[in-house]
Image (cartoon, rainbow, N blue to C red):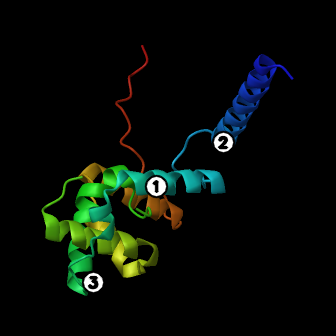
Amino acid sequence: MKRSTLVLVVALALVGVVAAIAASLLHDGLSARSTPNKLEITIARNARHLAIPSAARQAQNPLLASPEDLRDARLHFADHCTICHAAFSNGGEHGGTSDSWKLVHFIRHLPHLTAAERIEMERYNPKGPDDRAEEQQENEFLNGATPQRKPESKKHSQE
């Protein structure tokens, strides 16, 4: 086999592998909500590992997880982070090293939130009065209440 033919075959094989990987990654589109496949998980873990300096990877959390720290972190997360990261995702501003470590504990605790902790987070989630009123109307409707009628506009007399 000629050298140029061999180079062409290898190049085509590489293009095929790249196309297969791209098709695998993009088959459902790019979304943070879809469950990643094994290849995506492996790539993400390796990329994360390479992106974190070794000293930071080996650092131990200096704080012990306490109920008070988890509560502080939960309120911080509800107030600062949920707008981008959703309230109950796995996974803003940081108020210093201690607050950051509290958040580490809390983020690891997210999959195990109790109902009371979820309610507390929802209470501290930044919502305006209009959002809260709309949410209350939706809950009342879903619980069987008759929706209130909107004030009728003035009736125009027919001429």
- Of 108 and 54, the residue lying toward us: 54
Residue 22 lies left or right of residue 101; in this view the side is right
Q: Which mark is residue 65?
A: 3
Q: Earlier in the sequence, mark 2 or mark 3?
A: 2
Could you tell me which quadrant the C terminus lies in? top left
The crowding category of the residue bearing disc 3, from other C-alpha atoms within 10 Å (few below 14, some 14 to 19, many at least 20), is some
Q: Which residue is at 28% across, 67% downward?
A: 123
Q: Amino acid at mark 2?
A: Asp
Give the residue at the far right of this rendering: 1
Q: Residue 119's quadrant in the figure?
A: bottom left
Mark 2 and mark 1 residues within 8 Å of each other at the beta carbon: no
The residue that label 1 is drawn on is 147
Front position in the image: 88 or 41: 41
Please give the residue where the numbered disc 2 appears in the rendered image. Answer: 28
Q: Position of residue 87 (x, y in %)?
A: 38, 61
Identify the residue at horizontal 25%, vertical 85% (top origin).
Answer: 67
x and y, in percent, of residue 68 in the image: 20, 83
Which label's residue is closer to the chain start, 2 or 1? 2
Q: Residues within 10 Å of mark 1 (few under 14, many from 20)?
A: few
Secondary structure of the residue carrying numbered label 3: loop
- Three-letter amino acid code at the position of disc 3: Ala
